[in-house]
Image (cartoon, rainbow, N blue to C red):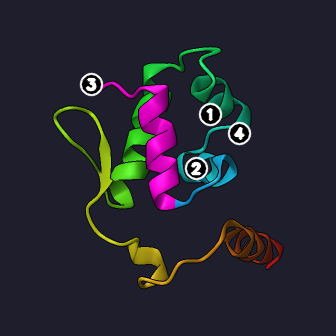
Amino acid sequence: MRNLTAEQLLAARTLLKWSRVRLGAKCNLSEATISEFENGLRKPHPRKVAAMLLAFEGSGIVFSAEGSPSLARPEVQTGGRHTGNRSWRRRQTNRAAE
């Protein structure tokens, strides 16, 4: 089981331009869990850390041997286009309403 630090989490979110809400939706965690981990208030259960790692790696984040994250490829879901978190939330809301 690999480890994930608060700094790595924030760096990976920044690379992907993901909000805490978006990461939470991708790995089925609350925004509060992510926020508390990033701010050093608590260490999440290893299963939750694994879910975050899976979400990052599925979106092209690669963690180097030193632990720093980098973007290996553009996010596939957007076809290379950047879509903001507002657009993503709107699509999720529209899907839920259908």
Q: Are marks 3 and 2 in contact (CB under 8 Å)?
A: no
Task: Locate residue 11: give its quadrant.
Answer: top left
Figure check: 18 above or below 63: below
Figure check: 12 above or below 76: above
Disc 1/disc 2 C-alpha distance (Å):
8 Å
Disc 3/disc 2 C-alpha distance (Å):
20 Å
Disc 4/disc 3 C-alpha distance (Å):
23 Å
Query: Residue farthest to the left?
Result: 65
Q: Are marks 1 and 4 in contact (CB under 8 Å)?
A: yes
User: Dot 4, crowdedness within 10 Å: few (<14), some or many (≥20)?
Assistant: some
Q: Please name the residue that numbered disc 3 is placed on.
A: 1
User: Dot 2, crowdedness within 10 Å: few (<14), some or many (≥20)?
Assistant: many
Q: Are marks 4 and 3 in contact (CB under 8 Å)?
A: no
Figure check: 52 above or below 77: above
Which element carries disc 1, helix, strand or loop?
helix
Q: Are marks 1 and 2 in contact (CB under 8 Å)?
A: yes
Q: Measuring from the top left, give residue 96's x and y in whole percent.
A: 77, 70
At x 30%, y 52%, the residue is 70
Q: Which mark is residue 34?
A: 1
Q: Amino acid at mark 3?
A: Met
Magenta stretch bounds: 1-16
Disc 1/disc 3 C-alpha distance (Å):
19 Å
Indicate which label's residue lies in the foreground, 3 or 2: 2
| Residue 51 visible in the shown view | no
Q: Measuring from the top left, give residue 28's x and y in whole percent.
A: 60, 44
Which of these two is toward me, 24 or 6?
6
Precedes in sequence: disc 1 or disc 2: 2
Q: Amino acid at mark 2?
A: Leu
Q: Please name the residue that numbered disc 4 is placed on.
A: 31
Precedes in sequence: disc 4 or disc 2: 2
Which element carries disc 2, helix, strand or loop?
helix
Task: Locate residue 32: give its quadrant.
Answer: top right
